[in-house]
Image (cartoon, rainbow, N blue to C red):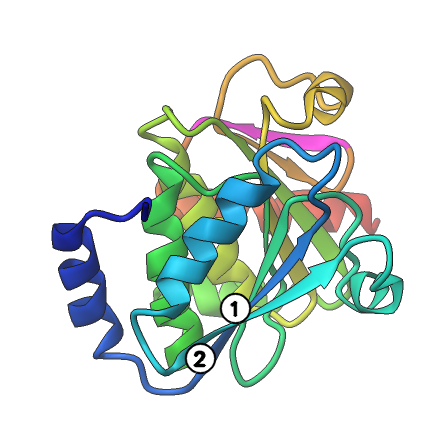
Amino acid sequence: MGLLQEKDREYIRDLFSKLTNPVKLIYFTQEIECQYCRETHQILDELSELSDKVNLEVYNFVTDKEMAEKYNVDKIPATVIEGTKDYGIRYYGIPSGYEFSSVLEDIVDVSKGDSGLSEESRQLLKEITSPLRLQVFVTPTCPYCPKAVRLAHKIAIENEFVTADMVEATEFPHLSMRYNVRGVPRTMIGEDYPIEGALPENAFVQKIVASYKQMNQ
């Protein structure tokens, strides 16, 4: 039985009818000892059936080690949303609940190859000129988390040096502990600079650029 209801499928088909360039969902899995790997695979499989412009590629995290290294995937379940190039968009954990909408909107943005950020944000982000990793810790029941995830992913689309990960906090408790995640969303800029909560675009971008500058003094 499918996870998506027919009314959801109709909505997504309509949304995907606006896609311009093809999009690849690159999924890393391992059926043994991986909570939610099977469910995540099913979600992505059902999504890919709703448009001929959305294609799913599935790799084994262990045996397809070269592909995992190519995309710097270090845990599973992991989903990369790739367009004409790899924009640095990553999902670690099942993109369910509120985060499902983030995946749909990311697919549309990646297909367009445009972040949709304001001109002010675009100019600010030009100051990031070396690799930077953002990690947005979320839970599926958090209504404010998609805003932070979407902004981080838009920033990754806009700036080739930025990789932005959604990390489902309850699936990766060791990371939640390491980064002192007590509430979500919590965005880690590099290893040491956190953003608590979901900020407006301008404030979010300013904080990331300011933290990047401090890291590179």
Horizontal placement of 122 versus 133: left or right? Answer: left
Q: Choose top left, top right, bottom left or bottom right for residue 32.
A: top right
Q: Is 194 one of the magenta-colored residues? A: yes
Residue type at mark 1: give it: Ile
Specify few, some or many for label 2: CA neighbours under 10 Å numbering under 14, 14-19, or 20 or more: some
On the image, the x and y values in percent for residue 80 come to 60, 61
* Mark sitting on residue 113: 2
Q: Is residue 149 left or right of residue 141?
A: right
- Position of residue 179 in the picture relative to residue 66 (left or right): left
Q: Report the amino acid beneath label 2.
A: Gly
* Percent of width and height locating residue 111: 40, 78
Q: Is residue 74 magenta?
A: no
Could you tell me which residue is drawn at 48 percent across and 28 percent down?
Answer: 185
* Residue pictured at 79% horizontal, 45% vertical: 215
Q: Position of residue 133 (x, y in %)?
A: 71, 51
Q: Along the horizontal axis of the image, is 192 left or right of 151?
A: right
The answer to whether residue 119 of the structure is visible from this angle is no
Measured along the vertical axis of the image, is residue 20 above or below residue 33?
below
Q: Please determine whether, in this image, residue 73 is positioned above or below residue 71.
A: above
Give the quarter of the figure containing the N terminus.
top left
Closest to the observer, 48 or 88: 48
Distance (Cα) linking label 1 and label 2: 7 Å
Question: Residue 92, position in %: x, y?
Answer: 62, 43
Instruction: Determine the secondary structure under disc 1.
Output: helix
The reply to whether the C-beta atoms of the residues labelled 1 and 2 are less than 8 Å apart is yes
Per the picture, the main secondary structure of the magenta-coloured stretch is strand
Q: Is residue 129 above or below residue 39?
A: below
Q: Which residue is mark 1?
A: 157
What's the magenta region? Answer: 192-197
